[in-house]
Structures are given as C-alpha cells and as structure tokens.
C-alpha cells in the first residue's frame, strides 16, 4: 500500500546550517534526495558532481536548489578534495553537515566474485568508497566549529551476504566500521557520524549490479511496509539526524529500507 506521506520538518529547522553533499549524479541520486531535503528544511547547500559527463545532469538541480557552491569532485584526482574544502572555508568559514554518497569498483571486479577480485580493484574500491570519507572527515572537522553531522551511505550487504554485491560487501563493512571509529574520535568536538543504509534504489550506481531488478523485487516483497523506498526517504532521515532533535545519536547504522533488514 503506497502511503505518499510528505514529511515537513518544523520551522525550517535547518535554517542557518550549511551542508556539503558529495556525489550528485542526476535526479535519481541518493545525494540529490539528501540535498533537496536539507534545502527544504532551510539549509544552504554546497554540492559536487564527478566530472564533465555528469555536469549537464547536475546543473539544473543546482539551479533548482539554489546551491551556493557547486564544484566538480573526483576524489581519485589529487588536490580536488582539498580544493572543495578550501572553497567552503573561503566562502562560508564553517560547515555543519557533510554527506558522502560516492562509491566505485571497477566493473570486472564488481561483477566477478570476491575470489576473483584483483588487488588493484579492491584497493580502488576501498579508496574511493571508504577511505575518501575519512579524508573528508579530516577536512570537515576543523570547519565544524559548532559541532556537526557526517553521513556515509552504506548498504545491507555490509552485514549480510547479498548475491552479486561481491567486493562492495567488505568495502561497505569497512565504511560502517570507519563511521563508528570516527564517531568515537569526533564525539568530543560535538560532531556526530552516521552510516545510512538505504534499501535498494534505482540509481545509476546500483545499475552496475548483476540481477539488480530481481533484488528490487525481492526487497519490495520482504518489506513489512510493502513497498520500496525512494531518495527522499533517505534525505528526510538525514535531515532529521542533522537537527537538534537527534543531538544524542551517533555512531550507529541507520536502516532506511521499509524494514527489510529485520526479515530473515
């Protein structure tokens, strides 16, 4: 049963907050859902896209959301990540929210089993999908002078075997562990860290998984709520967690999947 309930956070509760959302590819991206929810809750936005191929799909969204800062970012390219945070420091002087919504594995390593994953492919997947979040946290923390919230996007395959998820399972498990350790290290600075684990969504990144349509159908059948989630479900969850209403929550993995994760 489709519910179509549109949440409304009270009094634009993120007004005055400044959020960096990394990884918008198009209007189906989880990153876009997060940015849109933050903006509707009153936050100012900085957003990034990967490269020139993604730029035409992202520019209309930048205008729609009135993003104050919009820059390309390939975390595999030396200096680009530092340039983004330098611009934020110059323009804003501080940061309150960061969303890391990027992941990558070479296609051959992603579509083959874990036994066949090359050392180079594993290292590439780990660097872009996990270690880049640690690098972002290191750059963001000095700008979070009044505390803040960091988000990284994970998936159920971090904790249970999902057929065809392959190398991304261990990589996402490492990402969730990184969130816990960062929550511990950054807690004294009032910086909270959350791993967000959405259910399967029709995003460009997910389309690289073998038999993805079957995964979607199985999730819809298993969900106690009887339907798949959408990008705004993830966005509103992150918006809530970035507010003072969630000021004592940190370090956990938050499932946004209609309850799929509780079903054996």
Image (tube, rainbow, N blue to C red):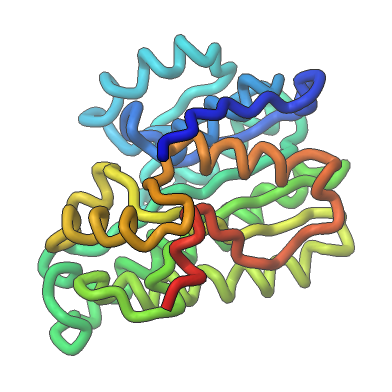
Q: Which residue occupies 77% across, 71% down?
A: 184
Residue 16 visible somewhere in the drawing:
no
Residue farthest bottom in this picture: 115
| 190 on left or right of 134 | right
Q: Relative to the observer, which residue lies in front, 79 or 7?
A: 7
**252 versus 103 height, above or below:** below
Residue 59 visible somewhere in the drawing:
yes
- Percent position (x, y) of residue 98? 62, 43
- Percent position (x, y) of residue 205? 27, 49
| 221 on left or right of 33 | left
**227 versus 159 height, above or below:** above
Where the N terminus falls, by quadrant? top left
Q: Relative to the observer, which residue lies in front, 44 or 141?
A: 44
- Percent position (x, y) of residue 164? 20, 71
Q: Which residue occupies 32% across, 74% down?
A: 123
Q: Relative to the observer, which residue lies in front, 205 or 50?
A: 205
**96 versus 108 height, above or below:** above
Tell how many labels. Answer: 0
Classify residue 202 by image quadrant.
top left
Q: Which residue occupies 45% across, 28% down?
A: 71
Q: Which residue occupies 38% across, 72% down?
A: 157
Residue farthest front in this picture: 1
- Percent position (x, y) of residue 182? 69, 67
Where the C terminus falls, by quadrant? bottom left
| 57 on left or right of 10 | left
């Amino acid at each position: 049963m489709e519910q179509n309930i549109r949440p409304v956070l009270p009094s634009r509760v993120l007004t005055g907050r400044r959020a960096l959302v990394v990884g918008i590819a198009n209007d189906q991206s989880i990153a876009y859902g997060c940015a849109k929810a933050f903006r509707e809750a009153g936050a100012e936005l900085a957003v990034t896209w990967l490269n020139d191929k993604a730029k035409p799909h992202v520019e209309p969204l930048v205008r729609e959301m009135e993003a104050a800062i919009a820059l390309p970012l390939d975390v595999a390219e030396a200096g680009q990540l530092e340039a983004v945070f330098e611009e934020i420091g110059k323009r804003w002087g501080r940061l309150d929210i960061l969303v890391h919504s990027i992941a990558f594995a070479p296609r051959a390593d992603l579509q083959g089993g874990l036994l066949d994953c090359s050392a180079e492919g594993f290292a590439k997947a780990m660097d872009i999908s996990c270690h880049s979040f640690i690098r972002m946290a290191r750059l963001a923390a000095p700008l979070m002078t009044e505390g803040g919230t960091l988000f990284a996007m994970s998936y159920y395959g971090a904790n249970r075997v999902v057929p065809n998820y392959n190398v991304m399972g261990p990589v996402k498990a490492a990402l969730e562990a990184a969130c816990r350790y960062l929550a511990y290290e950054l807690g004294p600075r009032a910086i909270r860290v959350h791993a967000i684990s959405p259910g399967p969504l029709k995003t460009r990144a997910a389309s690289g998984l073998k038999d993805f349509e079957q995964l979607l159908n199985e999730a819809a059948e298993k969900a106690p709520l009887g339907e798949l989630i959408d990008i705004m479900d993830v966005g509103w969850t992150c918006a809530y967690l970035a507010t003072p209403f969630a000021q004592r929550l940190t370090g956990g993995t938050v499932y946004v999947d209609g309850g799929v994760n509780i079903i054996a």
